[in-house]
Structures are given as structure tokens and as C-alpha cells.
Amino acid sequence: MSTTRDIQSALVPSVNLNLNVRGLAPSATLALNERSAELIAEGRDVIKLGLGQSPFPVPEVVVEALRQNAHQKDYLPVRGLAALRETVAEYHHRKNAVARHGAHVLVGPGSKELMFIIQLVYYGDLCIPTPSWVSYEPQARIIGRRVHWLRTMREHNWGLQPEELEELCRDDPERPRLVILNYPNNPTGYTYGVDKLRALADVARKYRVVMLSDEIYGEVDHEGTHRSIAEFYPEGTIISTGLSKWCGAGGWRLGTFTFPDNLKWLLESMAVVASETFTATSAPIQFAAVRAFAGGAEIEEYLKQSRRVLRALGRYCAQRLRDADIVVGDPDGAFYLFPDFRAFRPQMKEHGITTSAEMCERLLDDVGVATIPGSSFGREPSELTLRLSYVDFDGARALSTAARSSGDLDPSFVAECCPRLRDAVDRMANWASSF
Ligand code: GLU
């Protein structure tokens, strides 16, 4: 006769768990955010540079559109609200010079979900540069896809070089591949210039790769000059974007994929999965998103000030770290830096730190600064890199202070509006120097 204990242990999923999920831990960005929150709840002073969440409030016109649509209660079409799909297509026409129609757009509950579904329906290998955002590779592993990491170099600001892509594709030219190119980049803040995009597009076309262009940070290119690879490889590029990063609305969970005509079959396959999983994206959020993607003067002003603030902070933090012999370049966009502490390797080793994970753990324990190890982005565990998100400040206050001035925001702006961030980079620099 089986006892309660037998029945309970039969339910412990040590061997029954999907083999692709075994060995995976919750996403590094989200796990760290929860750990930081626990430490703060215990009374620790933690500066949160872990999660890449926009520090800025959602623009008031978009919040108002959400208020006006709180009553929307019906399920919307699986592919998305027709007006939103149209507006997103016009947005890409206006911003990225690519001709698309509403029929080319798929709306989802965050671009992360759409990235998972495309890997589920597309049979190609996943090809991603190292470093890359923490979730692309685990998604591929969960689904059981092969992953190829494409080598990059610090000298090229960790950007993918056309030669690296060529080398991978040349090996097996007919192999179906999904390449994810993310720029401005998470975790490095780097973005590609037009010549590099053109050269990458040439290789992609030659080997007919499906290019998933993750442009979620496109609007927070610090100069406001973001260009899309879809301009140069229109027939093979899917543009991914959403409200999370440029509209301050990560928690609203809305992302979009915009397909070229000849990849519409992929959209249709994804819509089948969507219909059997998330059904449709939240209705009020979709109505509000129409307002966000329609743009206009208020939103352009909001973006202009967001970029000025991020540009000043990115440069300030990078300079402060460089002054302490930490290797890092100025970012071009987004809100990330990917510094390298290699100069401190011998001293850190004496204190038992030999991996990026150990380094981040000690940084959090010793001086209360939460960051994410380079190994979570596909770097060698022994490389002493980490990602910091320069977002721990009051975004509303920073925007209104920035709006009262023009030109470059100087360090006094950082001291006035972002004291915790200033404190965080001081703590990091002093901590490294203490070894
Ligand atoms: N994309 C953000 C990051 O890299 C947070 C959201 C997420 O990872 O799901 O920190």
C-alpha cells in the first residue's frame, strides 16, 4: 500500500521535469531583482543596478489613453488590435524607413514571449553574439534548439562583425538560421553604425538567414539617430520592439514583431501558437499602445529628455569607472554598461574571486551594489565582466530637471538628481581599488 510520503515523492519532479528545463535557473535579471528586494526588506542598503527597467514614468498622454480604455474588456484578435497593428506599421515607416502594413504586425504580451514563440515555430539554429541578453539562449534550450554563440571582441565594443557571421554561415551555407541582432545593445550599450549594418545585411542576404532585429532600445539611442538593419535587408528582417524600454512600461507587457512580406508565413505560424497560449494581449494596454506608437510632440519631447539624461549618466558612470582602471567604453544607447575588471584579477584571486559570478556576489555583499555577472550573458565564467543598469534614480524628477536646461547635462545634474547612482559607481570603483 502506498503511503502519503510515497505519493508525495512521486510528485517531486526530479526526473519527470522536461529535460530541457532541468538545470536551468530562473532568469538572471529577474532572480537578482527578487534577491535585491529581499535584502532591502531585511534592512540592507542595496543600490539596484541589476534589472534593466526604464527609470522613467510612462508619458502622461499614454497613461491618459489607458485610463480612457480601462473599460475595454473583450478578447481582441489573436494577432492584435487592427488599429494598433496599423499604427505600429506606420511607426516603422516613419522611424525606420521600412514599408510595412498592419497585416505584417504581430502583437504579444512582451517581445520576450514573441521571441520564445518564434523559436518554437522556426526550425533554424539560434545564432547570437556573445555577450547577449540573458534570455535568448535559455529560451532556445527550453525548446531544444541548437545555439551558436558568435564571437565578438572588446576592441569592437563587443559588436558582431560581418566576418564572424560569414565564418559561421560558410561552414554549412544551406542551414536555416535565426540570428538575433540587438542594438542599442543589452548588455553593452553599443550600437551599430550604418556601414556595419549594411555589411551585416549583405552576409545575411547571402546566406538567407532570418534576421530578428531586436530594437527594443532603438528610441533610447542617446543621439536619437537609431537606424534599422531592415533598411538594408528588408526581405529577411523581422523588427522587434515594444513599450518596455522607451515608454517606461515594462510591466504593461506589450511587444510587437513586424515581418516582411515573404516571412508572413512565420507570423501565421506564430499566431497559431498565440491562439493556443496567450489568446490575445491585454485589451486596455493595446488601446493605450496605439497612442504611444502614434507619437507626436509630447512623446518626442519625452524621448528627447530621456536620451539627454541617459547620455549624461552613461558617460558619467563610464568615466568614473575608467578613472579607477576598470575597462569600459562610453555607451551609445540604452541604460547599460559592461565593464571589465581584468586589471584586478591577481588581487581578486587572492581574495577568492575567480569568476564574474563570485565577483558580483562579493560586490553585493561587501558594498550593496546589485549587478549581473558577464557569465549570464554568455561570457566565459572566468572573465571578470558584469552588467550594470544605470537606472536607480527618480526618472520623473530627472526628466523635469533636464527639461529646464539645454545642452549637455553635467556632473552637477548627476549629483542633484541621481545621488544613488553616483554613490553606486563610487562604491564600485572604491571596492575594486581596495583589492
Ligand atoms: N530586459 C531587462 C533586462 O535585461 C529586464 C526584463 C527581462 O529580462 O525579462 O534586465
Image: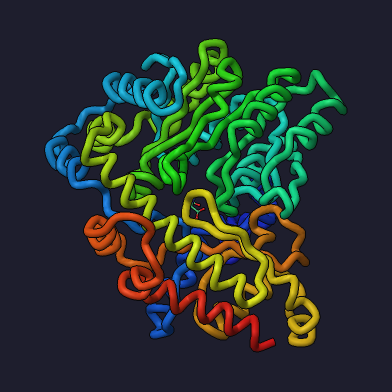
Q: Residue at x 68, y 25 (%)?
A: 123
Quick one: which residue is furthest to the front in this view?
407
Q: Position of residue 193 (x, y in %)?
A: 59, 37
- Residue 432 in the image: above or below residue 116: below
Q: Is residue 316 left or right of residue 343?
A: left
| Quadrant housing the N terminus | bottom right
Q: Is residue 59 left or right of residue 430?
A: left
Q: Residue at x 46, y 38 (%)?
A: 225
> Is residue 23 visible in the rendered structure shown here?
yes
| Quadrant housing the C terminus | bottom right
Q: Position of residue 224 (x, y in %)?
A: 42, 41
Q: Is residue 136 left or right of residue 60?
A: right
The picture quadrant where one finds residue 348 is bottom right
Q: Position of residue 284 (x, y in %)?
A: 22, 36
How many numbered callouts?
0
Task: State how the image is colored.
Answer: rainbow
Q: Residue at x 51, y 24 (%)?
A: 270
Q: Residue at x 67, y 51 (%)?
A: 157
- Residue 332 in the image: above or below residue 383: above
> Is residue 28 visible in the rendered structure shown here?
no
Quick one: which residue is furthest to the top in this view?
262
Closest to the observer, 301 or 121: 301
Q: Position of residue 216 (x, y in %)?
A: 46, 40
The picture quadrant where one finds residue 399 is bottom left
Closest to the observer, 122 or 215: 215
